[in-house]
Image: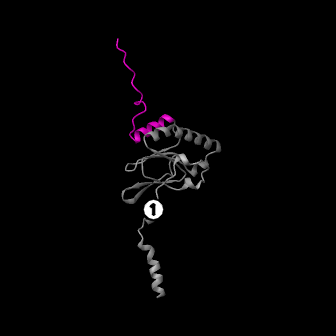
Amino acid sequence: MRAATVLALALLPSCRPQNAAVTTRNTDTLSYANVTPRDSADSALLKPRVITEPTVVVFWLSGADTLSADDQAQALDELNATTEGIAPTLAQHHITLIPTNSDTIYVALPNRQRRMILLTGVDYPFGYVLVAPGTAERILAGVYDDDELLDEVEAYFDLPSTADSTPPRPRVAT
């Protein structure tokens, strides 16, 4: 009887689906607006993100700690300024903006499946990931100026260009 109990306990874990741990997690609810920046060891930001809608992910990985303190501060200031600059455009088009310190992002797929995006090994340990579920992601590693990032976002999400949104000048007929 004891051997049968041990055998049953040994076989029990093999009855679960292989992806049970991945498919039962809840979606990510942390947003850029309600995150107080701390440091790269902040546990809320280290949790891998699950993307379910058009999203721009701002990432700052622990590899940035290898930069000098001045370089880190300068890169972080530029990253924050550029991110704040595009936030209104993203909100206007219902594109979520979230931060992460995790090197892994998951994109929700149909049938409760997930696709993993690894950020380790990119050129810079900070930048942006543009994600629209159902399409390939676009990783923008490093610091971008406002116009470059806005152009990338407009092209990826197929948004109308901000240059197109300015009203045309009226023609003067003589």
Residue ID for mark 1? 22
Residue furthest right as drawn: 69
Number of numbered discs on residues: 1
* Span colored in magenta: 146-174
Q: Observer-nearest residue: 125 or 17? A: 17
The residue type indicated by label 1 comes to Val
Q: Magenta part mainly helix, strand or loop?
A: loop
Residue 154 position, x and y percent, is: 42, 38
Q: Quadrant of residue 73?
A: top right
Q: Quadrant of residue 112?
A: bottom left
> As displayed, is residue 44 above or below residue 169?
below
Q: Is residue 95 left or right of residue 34?
A: left
Q: Observer-nearest residue: 82 or 123? A: 82
Residue 156 position, x and y percent, is: 41, 42
Image quadrant holding the C terminus, namely: top left
> As displayed, is residue 15 above or below residue 113?
below
Q: Observer-nearest residue: 107 or 169? A: 169
Tell me which residue sits at (56%, 54%) in the image: 44
Say what secondary structure mark 1 lies in. Answer: helix
Tell me which residue sits at (47%, 86%) in the image: 3
Residue 62 position, x and y percent, is: 58, 52
Q: Residues within 10 Å of mark 1 (few under 14, many from 20)?
A: few
Tell me which residue sits at (34%, 14%) in the image: 173
User: What scheme was used to colour the molecule?
Assistant: one colour
Residue furthest bottom as drawn: 1
Whether residue 36 is in magenta: the answer is: no
Whether residue 169 is in magenta: the answer is: yes
Residue furthest top as drawn: 174
Residue 109 position, x and y percent, is: 39, 55
